[in-house]
Image (cartoon, helix red, strand yellow):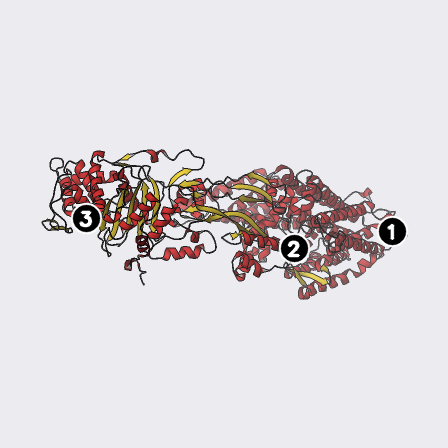
């Protein structure tokens, strides 16, 4: 394979200037926000290296320098060393697990003097590259089960290690690859169930089994009915199912010795009715009903077992999810999110003004310059500021997706989409947790949160995508991407 | 490469991204623009509600002397978050706040991280606070309070004490909150509403306590001072005289009902129960004292009034027209009828009313009592007579609360017809309960009620409800009930005969000649109450002078022997002090002060 058609002499001429500008805007906002979050009024030495904002500026310089170097490298290099990097990343993760330093309960850090690096930040680059390479290999087919298993294995190994490191939050980033896989043409019948079951898992903590069961029956019947346009049969089915189980329920409970819950009756009748539904599907040749039936049965099984699965999680993870779902009243668990919501919520439309955020100033928001940096923006610049940052991130992600779509080979496209997926995931989780719609996971807001290793890793990852984009010769004739 | 257009999947992928950002943006808009809850919460987060405690009202005696005043002190609270990471001199701090270093470290470790919590349950003195300020340690805050201080260290039970309000009280009355002080017992409890004042509130910026951003929401209102009816010097004398004896002294100004002195002995030093480090230990010490210094005998104990009650028997007899002052009864060392026998001491016989009072003849009043109850012309049976008798007794303030302003007042006890029906299975008559006539039997009176009886006789037939407070700052008058004459059911014309007897008892040939004060026509009646526990109780009620009485007094010394033995000299010395402002009998005073009575019955029971 020859990836080297790019004109190196006009490297910066062919770089996506919009994307570069967005990158620079985001990191600048990051430094500004970190300054606000860590500025102390009567600090003695403004430029002291001990200040977080000075550190961040230095790291920004390093990141940009490394980024330029990355741009200068030939894109084929990344393709060549992708697997090697993956192996190195796994070794590094294992080494961290063995010798790493524990920060906030996660044994996920390496320390070199004053510099502290989170291994997973860098391992992500290697995993992205190797996944991209795997999916661009000859013979890889998104439709083939074998191929998908390979991808899954490639992701599960680092995910398992982060679980052992007690840093599952960082590892879960790899779940975002589903977004890239979707773009690559993953069967929607694989995408939808995964997301569906994930959602159901969360809902099962919130709602009683009976209401979930009824909701499931309705959702499945209605979607089946829209998919196959058999309104009459669906209505009859629903009427028979609920009418029959209600009658059965009354009948059984009228016998003095027997006492059954409506849930049990409805569950058994529904599961029994599946036989009838299958027969119906076979006769009418509506094959999609089979898929729905199996998904439904799996969903129904998941609902009561979610508690058991929940127990596999580490206690602090359980706490975070419980907090998020509002199951626990423990004030200390809620504290971070509560304070964060208060800080953002009190920002109003235009915010309290730069360096005027009382909440941030008084140190009430924990991790205000790292994971909760979005609070600083939300409180001091208000809704307008926060929306601007979100729009910039959205534009940047779009730009990365555009880069991916413009790539002529799978390797580059998959890589760009993985970068977009990771940024999307980080943004969703990080912003989502500060405003209380996602459980707290310790992952930073890309390019904005304070943290040298995070900034450097994101920069390298992004600049590789920039390089792929810049080194794609635009003048070449277009051809169908699929 | 736009020419080829995007694949459908790429389009859907973009829609998904936009949807995700839309969710974030909408939620953001909701909490920032629509829901204003968070703005309010934000303020609560860095503004600290600092309670400004008002100084408690001070208590003065009737002559304007301070009985209870305020001393400035400081509560210490901590916020662990603000403490220096490098640590601080815990030894020094522990000395200043008066706890052990280990306890201090433990306390800090257990304190909430961000929330302010009190370091100690008691405040520290000003000097310690200033020293603590000098150390300038982060995370330590002080807030101003006041606690009591007692210049004369008298009137423990009278004044009561102050302590932190209990959880139960907070639940009942939400104007209190944790950490507030509240009056316990005595005056502090009775006039809590007047004395406590109103708390103020300031919204203080936690991080800039002195800044101008602090807004005072409410200024504290100092508690109102009260002038009480007590005469401090008299109170002190009475307490000293009662030292070593168990009992009570109550002195009332008959013309107003004002309580001049109220001593419950043994008493305690009110300074010991001031909120502070030692309060707990001192309280435990007092509560475990078998002589029960915290029990206010003056208003709570039920004592048999003994012979002092003969005054009431005589008065009722006259009102019921079964007794004329010139009626004579004979006494042969007591009253004998059937199996009943009530003894008496040796004295001339037969005798008329005034001498019967003066020499305290038991038999005389047994006759009177029987005549009251067995008045066939009026009452079919003695039980009906008894009920009439009981009504009279209650009109003298016995067997019920006097409705004074002093909380915790006991009612004493006057038995009822039902009580005797039950006890004697309905078969009883005047003879069965004959000992009531001389203030024995089931009768129980508080020393306050006995002093009130002295005041009634002094006033010739009425009393003002005894009260402890004379004037409240900012109020023109007290409750109207304290200005109304309370008449007994006995006509005022009968009282002079009783007064004659009481005068004779002191000034001529009676039992209480020890109470004689030249030029003051002291009137008095002794009592020697038999009891099952030991030596007789010694009691004496008296007023002086005979005309325009200035003071009415009741002294009760448990197991003090004859009335004349202990109670008379104590009452007499107090009257002398009050009427002449000097003591002309220093030797007697020293003797009484030093006299200690043995109380085997109060010894701690060994388990």
Q: Quadrant of residue B261?
A: top left
Residue at the extreme right of the image, as rendered: A9
The CA span between labels 1 and 3 is: 117 Å
Q: Which mark is residue A154?
A: none
Q: Where residue B431 sits in the image (x, y, percent)?
A: 13, 46
The CA span between labels 2 and 1 is: 37 Å
Q: In this rendered view, identify the residue nearer to me: A391 or B175.
A: B175
Numbered disc 2: what chain?
A
Does the rendering let one see residue B387?
no
Q: Which quadrant: the C terminus of chain B?
A: bottom left
Residue A336 as seen in the image, left or right of residue A31: left
The CA span between labels 3 and 2 is: 82 Å
Numbered disc 3: what chain?
B
Please give the residue where the numbered disc 2 appears in the rendered image.
Answer: A169
Please give the residue where the numbered disc 1 appears in the rendered image.
Answer: A11
Q: In this rendered view, identify the residue nearer to me: B442 or A172.
A: B442
Badge 2, how many Cα within 10 Å: few under 14, some, many 20+? some
1 vs 3, front mark: 3
């Amino acid at each position: 394979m020859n990836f080297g058609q790019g004109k190196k002499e006009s490297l910066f001429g062919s770089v996506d200037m919009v994307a570069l500008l967005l990158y620079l805007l985001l990191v600048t906002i990051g430094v500004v926000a970190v300054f606000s979050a860590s500025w102390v009024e009567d600090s003695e030495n403004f430029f002291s290296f001990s200040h977080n904002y000075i550190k961040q500026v230095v790291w920004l310089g390093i990141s940009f320098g490394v980024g330029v170097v990355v741009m200068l490298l030939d894109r084929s290099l990344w393709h060549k060393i992708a697997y090697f990097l993956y192996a190195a990343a796994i070794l590094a993760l294992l080494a961290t697990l063995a010798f790493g330093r524990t920060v906030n309960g996660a044994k996920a850090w390496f320390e070199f003097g004053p510099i502290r690096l989170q291994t997973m930040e860098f391992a992500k680059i290697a995993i992205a590259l190797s996944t991209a390479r795997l999916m661009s290999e000859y013979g890889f087919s998104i439709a083939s089960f074998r191929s998908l298993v390979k991808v899954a294995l490639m992701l599960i190994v680092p995910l398992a290690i982060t679980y052992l490191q007690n840093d599952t939050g960082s590892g879960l980033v790899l779940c975002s690859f589903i977004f890239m896989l979707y773009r690559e043409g993953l069967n929607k019948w694989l995408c939808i169930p995964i997301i569906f079951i994930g959602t159901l898992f969360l809902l099962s903590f919130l709602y009683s089994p009976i209401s979930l069961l009824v909701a499931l029956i309705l959702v499945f019947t209605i979607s089946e009915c829209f998919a196959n346009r058999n309104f009459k049969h669906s209505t009859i089915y629903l009427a028979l199912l609920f009418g029959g189980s209600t009658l059965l329920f009354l009948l059984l409970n009228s016998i003095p010795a027997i006492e059954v819950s409506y849930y049990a009756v409805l569950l058994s009748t529904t599961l029994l009715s599946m036989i009838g539904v299958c027969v119906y599907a076979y006769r009418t040749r509506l094959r999609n009903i089979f898929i729905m039936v199996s998904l439904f049965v799996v969903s129904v099984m998941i609902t009561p077992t979610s508690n058991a699965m929940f127990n596999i999680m580490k206690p602090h993870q359980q706490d975070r999810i419980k907090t998020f779902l509002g199951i626990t009243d423990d004030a200390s668990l809620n504290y971070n999110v509560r304070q964060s919501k208060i800080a953002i919520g009190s920002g109003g439309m235009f915010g309290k003004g730069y360096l005027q955020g009382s909440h941030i100033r008084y140190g009430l928001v924990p991790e205000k310059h790292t994971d909760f940096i979005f609070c600083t923006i939300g409180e001091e610049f208000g809704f307008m500021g926060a929306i601007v940052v979100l729009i910039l991130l959205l534009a940047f992600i779009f730009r990365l997706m555009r880069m991916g779509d413009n790539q002529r080979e799978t390797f580059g496209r998959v890589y760009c989409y993985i970068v977009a997926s990771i940024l999307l995931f980080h943004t969703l989780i990080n912003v989502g947790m500060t405003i209380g719609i996602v459980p707290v996971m310790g992952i930073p807001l890309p390019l904005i949160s304070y943290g040298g290793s995070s900034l450097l890793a994101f920069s390298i990852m992004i600049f590789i995508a920039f390089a792929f984009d810049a080194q794609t010769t635009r003048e070449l004739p277009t051809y169908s991407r699929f | 490469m736009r020419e080829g257009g995007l694949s459908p999947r790429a389009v859907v992928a973009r829609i998904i991204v936009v949807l995700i950002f839309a969710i974030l943006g909408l939620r953001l808009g909701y909490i920032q623009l629509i829901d204003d809850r968070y703005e309010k919460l934000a303020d609560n987060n860095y503004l600290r509600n600092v309670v400004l405690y008002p100084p408690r009202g001070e208590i003065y005696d009737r002559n304007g002397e301070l009985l209870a005043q305020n001393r400035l002190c400081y509560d210490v609270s901590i916020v662990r978050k603000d403490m220096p990471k490098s640590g601080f001199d815990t030894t020094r701090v522990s000395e200043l706040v008066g706890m052990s270093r280990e306890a201090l470290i433990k306390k800090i470790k257990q304190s909430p991280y961000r929330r302010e919590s009190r370091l100690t349950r008691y405040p520290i003195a000003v000097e310690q606070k200033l020293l603590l300020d000098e150390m300038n340690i982060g995370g330590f805050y002080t807030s101003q309070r006041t606690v009591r201080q007692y210049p004369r260290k008298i009137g423990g039970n009278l004044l009561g004490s102050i302590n932190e309000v209990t959880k139960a009280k907070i639940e009942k009355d939400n104007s209190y909150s944790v950490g507030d002080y509240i009056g316990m017992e005595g005056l502090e409890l009775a006039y809590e509403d007047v004395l406590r004042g109103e708390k103020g509130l300031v919204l203080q910026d936690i991080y800039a306590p002195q800044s101008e951003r602090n807004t005072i929401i409410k200024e504290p209102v100092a508690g109102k001072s009260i002038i009480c009816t007590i005469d401090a010097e008299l109170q002190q004398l009475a307490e000293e005289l009662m030292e070593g004896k168990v009992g009570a002294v109550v002195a009332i100004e008959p013309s107003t009902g004002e309580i001049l002195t109220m001593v419950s002995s043994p008493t305690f030093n009110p300074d010991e129960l001031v909120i502070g480090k030692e309060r707990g230990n001192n309280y435990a010490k007092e509560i475990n004292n078998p002589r029960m210094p915290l029990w206010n005998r003056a208003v709570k104990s039920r004592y048999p009034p003994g012979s002092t009650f003969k005054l009431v028997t005589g008065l009722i007899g006259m009102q019921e027209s079964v007794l004329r002052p010139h009626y004579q009864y004979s006494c042969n060392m007591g009253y004998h009828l059937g199996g009943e026998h009530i003894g008496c001491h040796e004295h001339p016989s037969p005798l008329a009313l005034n001498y019967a009072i003066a020499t305290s003849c038991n038999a005389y009043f047994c006759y009177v009592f029987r005549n009251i109850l067995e008045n066939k012309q009026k009452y079919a049976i003695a039980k009906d007579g008894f009920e009439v008798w009981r009504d009279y007794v209650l009109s003298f303030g016995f067997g019920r609360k006097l409705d004074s302003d002093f909380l915790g007042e006991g009612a004493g006890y006057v038995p009822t017809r039902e009580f005797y029906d039950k006890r004697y299975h309905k078969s009883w008559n005047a003879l069965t309960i004959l000992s009531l006539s001389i203030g024995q039997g089931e009768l129980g009176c508080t020393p306050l009620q006995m002093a009130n009886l002295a005041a009634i006789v002094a006033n010739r037939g009425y009393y003002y409800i005894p009260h402890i407070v004379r004037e409240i700052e900012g109020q023109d008058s007290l409750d109207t009930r304290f200005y109304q004459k309370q008449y007994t059911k006995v006509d005022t014309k009968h009282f002079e005969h009783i007064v004659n007897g009481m005068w004779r008892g002191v000034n001529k040939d009676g039992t209480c000649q020890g109470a004689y004060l030249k030029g003051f026509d002291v009137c008095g009646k002794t009592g020697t109450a038999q009891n099952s526990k030991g030596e007789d109780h010694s009691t004496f009620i008296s007023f002086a002078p005979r005309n325009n009485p200035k003071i009415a007094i009741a002294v009760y010394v448990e197991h003090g022997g004859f009335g004349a033995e202990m109670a008379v000299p104590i009452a007499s010395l107090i009257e002398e002090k009050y009427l002449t402002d000097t003591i002309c009998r220093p030797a007697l005073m020293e003797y009484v002060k030093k006299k200690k009575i043995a109380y085997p019955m109060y010894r701690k029971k060994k388990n």
